[in-house]
């Protein structure tokens, strides 16, 4: 069974631009969560989607948004990029419940210049 | 809300020595507990998990962890560390519906030859 895939793996953007990251969960998994990882803040939860609905949201500004499609694939979007948005963005999938094992993708490394 | 602490930010051990990484959690009910490992620039890989039953759980790569409810701890152990174990280790607690999966701040492990 294929693992969680994330595209692209690396991105370079400039301040003010927007970016869309994609995540394909493990087949059969319906929950997708997104995390931001930085050296200073560690792993921070962005949001979780389940069956195309946002089920939970972390403490991030509205510039960060996401969605989930009927095939469980998910995208996250960051508008008006800031330098502080430079981070590793990790996607994780689980079968259904938030407490279940989360399986992580390799991440997308975003650099904002 | 649940929380996870990992008291040690950085640990250095010699190859062949034993290892114990500490994890303490705060959670109102029986927790779902996890240990993940992350190599530089990579996603998180699940080492082991505890849901219920035997409090000593075995994982991949020779790791084990013991759940101690009285101490709210879930410490990770390995009897003999290999140089390839150098990485960052995250303890996490699974969430009830409506709450997010919570990670500890991580412990960076360095291995001396």
Image (cartoon, coloured by chain):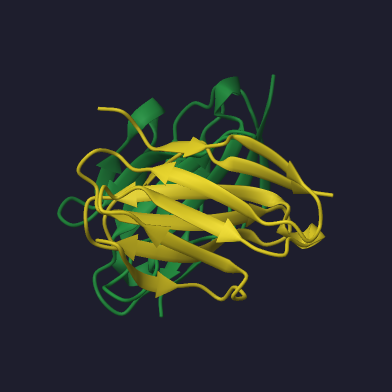
Chain colours: A yellow, B green
Give the vertical position of A53 relative to A14 (above or below).
below
Residue A79 x, y percent position in the rendering: 65, 63
Residue B13 x, y percent position in the rendering: 64, 34
Residue B68 x, y percent position in the rendering: 32, 61
- Residue in the image at 32% along x and 71% along y: B70
Residue B76 visible in the picture = no
- Residue in the image at 52% along x and 39% along y: B43
Q: Is residue B51 left or right of residue B85?
A: left
Figure quadrant of the N terminus of chain A? top left
Give the vertical position of B29 relative to A104 (above or below).
below
Q: Residue furthest top?
A: B113
Give the vertical position of B86 relative to B28 (above or below).
above
- Residue in the image at 72% along x and 65% along y: A80
Residue A69 x, y percent position in the rendering: 32, 54
Q: Residue furthest right?
A: A113
Q: Is residue B81 left or right of residue A68?
A: right
- Residue in the image at 41% along x and 61% along y: A67
Nearest the viewer among A107 and B26 is: A107
């Amino acid at each position: 069974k294929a693992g969680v895939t994330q595209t692209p793996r690396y991105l370079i953007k400039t301040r003010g631009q927007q970016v869309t990251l994609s995540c394909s969960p493990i087949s059969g998994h319906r929950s997708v969560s997104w995390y931001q990882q930085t050296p200073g803040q560690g792993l921070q939860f962005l949001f979780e989607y389940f069956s195309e609905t946002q089920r939970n949201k972390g403490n991030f500004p509205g510039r960060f948004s996401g969605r989930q499609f009927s095939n469980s694939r998910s995208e996250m979007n960051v508008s008006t990029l800031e330098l502080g948005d430079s981070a590793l963005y990790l996607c994780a999938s689980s079968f259904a419940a938030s407490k279940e094992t989360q399986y992580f993708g390799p991440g997308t490394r975003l650099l904002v210049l | 809300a649940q929380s996870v602490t990992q008291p040690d930010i950085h640990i250095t051990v010699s190859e062949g020595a034993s290892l114990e990484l500490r994890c303490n959690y705060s959670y109102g009910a029986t927790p779902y507990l996890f240990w993940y490992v992350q190599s530089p620039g990579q996603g998180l890989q699940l080492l082991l998990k505890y849901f219920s039953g035997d409090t000593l759980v075995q994982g991949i790569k020779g790791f084990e962890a013991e759940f101690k409810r009285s101490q709210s701890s879930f410490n990770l152990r390995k009897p003999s560390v290999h140089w390839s174990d150098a990485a960052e280790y995250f303890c996490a607690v699974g969430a009830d519906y409506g709450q997010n999966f919570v990670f500890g701040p991580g412990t960076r492990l360095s291995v001396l030859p």
